[in-house]
Structures are given as C-alpha cells and as structure tokens.
Image (tube, grey):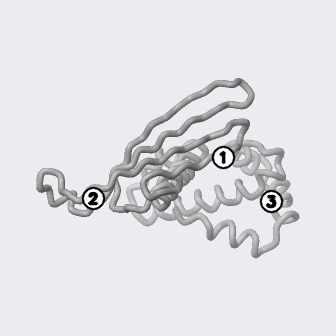
C-alpha cells in the first residue's frame, strides 16, 4: 500500500474476490461550490470475482467521493457500507420492513427495534437450524414458538443472547 493503491483478496462462498482500490487526492473545490468544501479524494474500487465452481469471472467497478485521504480507511469504509446494506436487505426481505406504514414515529421505531432484535436472534440460531434462510427461521418461530424457543434457550446463555441483541445498532 503506497497511499494511492490498496488490494485485498478473500475466499468465501465458493468464490475468490479481489478488490483493487485507487485513490486520487484533490485539493480544489468543484466550480467553487461550498457543498464540496470537504472533498479530499476520488476512489475507484474494482472488484474481480472468480467462481471456483463454475469458473465464471465477473467484474464490478464503482466510484466514490470522500473526505478521507487514507486508502486503507477508504477501503474499510466501503466494505463497512455494504455490510450495513446487507443488514437492511435482511430487514426488508425477511421482515418486509419497507412495507411498514405506521404513521406514529414511536410505533415505527418500536417495530423496527423488534425486527432488529428478531433478526439478531435468527442469525444466532441459524447454525443450529441447518443453516436455513432467515425468512424460513422466522416462519419456523411463528409456526412453532415453543420448540424453537427451546432450541434458542438450550444453546445460548443469557449473556450471549444479550450480546447478540445489543449488537444490532444499524
């Protein structure tokens, strides 16, 4: 890493992902706009994916603007952003949170908090339920709460449950 280029690679889910990050620093404002006064860099992220099963190769290129000038921090922020997006994707697809039409702000917040706690519990029990999808685990809890609660309580102590639920801050 020389301050303008960063590379990382990981193997997961039968594929190898390699990401190349390129950073270009800027110290000029765009057309004198005050909205861009903290703009410090442009980042390009190239992601190469090699599927180990099919041999298929794919590539994605994304561009970002940032107030950061450290390429390592930029890479971390970009990866962190997609983790948050995945969390919200779970809430939308498994809990249909985007369909919530509650008009009362407190009701909406309570509903959202309950969904996040339920998601944390579903993710916690997923390995004990044959790695089923979050949606299937949620439906399983709805159909047979006693059995699934027994699985939950037999495999985790109070501190593990408290930690999992409190970790859902997004």
Would residue 147 be seen by someone viewing this image from the given angle?
Answer: yes
Disc 3 marks which residue?
149
Q: Residue furthest left?
A: 32
Residue 28 vs 167, above or below: the answer is above
Q: CA distance from mark 2 to mark 1?
A: 30 Å
Residue 56 percent location from the top left of the image: 64, 24
Q: Residue at x 78, y 45 (%)?
A: 131
Q: Looking at this view, is 140 or 79 the one in front?
A: 79
Residue 156: image tag: none
Residue 115 percent location from the top left of the image: 58, 57
Disc 1 marks which residue?
10
Disc 2 marks which residue?
39
Q: Residue furthest right?
A: 154
Left or right: residue 31 versus residue 55 is left
Foreground tag (3 vs 2): 2
Q: CA distance from mark 1 to mark 3?
A: 35 Å
Would residue 77 be seen by someone viewing this image from the given angle?
Answer: no
Say whether disc 2 or disc 1 marks the residue closer to the N-terminus.
Answer: 1
Q: CA distance from mark 3 to mark 2?
A: 50 Å
Residue 132 percent location from the top left of the image: 76, 43
């Amino acid at each position: 890493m020389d301050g303008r280029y960063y590379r990382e690679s990981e193997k997961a889910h039968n594929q190898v992902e390699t990401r190349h990050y390129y950073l270009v620093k800027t110290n000029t404002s765009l057309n004198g706009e005050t909205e861009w006064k903290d703009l410090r860099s442009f980042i390009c992220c190239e992601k190469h994916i090699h599927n180990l099963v099919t041999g298929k190769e794919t590539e994605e290129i994304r561009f970002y603007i940032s107030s950061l000038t450290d390429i390592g921090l930029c890479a971390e922020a970009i990866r962190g952003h997609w983790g948050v997006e995945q969390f919200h994707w779970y809430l939308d697809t498994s809990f249909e949170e985007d369909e919530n039409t509650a008009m009362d702000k407190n009701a909406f917040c309570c509903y959202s908090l309950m969904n996040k706690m339920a998601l944390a519990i579903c993710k916690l029990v997923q390995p004990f339920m044959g790695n089923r999808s979050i949606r299937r685990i949620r439906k399983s809890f709805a159909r047979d709460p006693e059995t699934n609660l027994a699985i939950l309580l037999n495999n985790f102590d109070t501190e593990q449950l408290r930690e999992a639920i409190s970790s859902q801050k997004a």
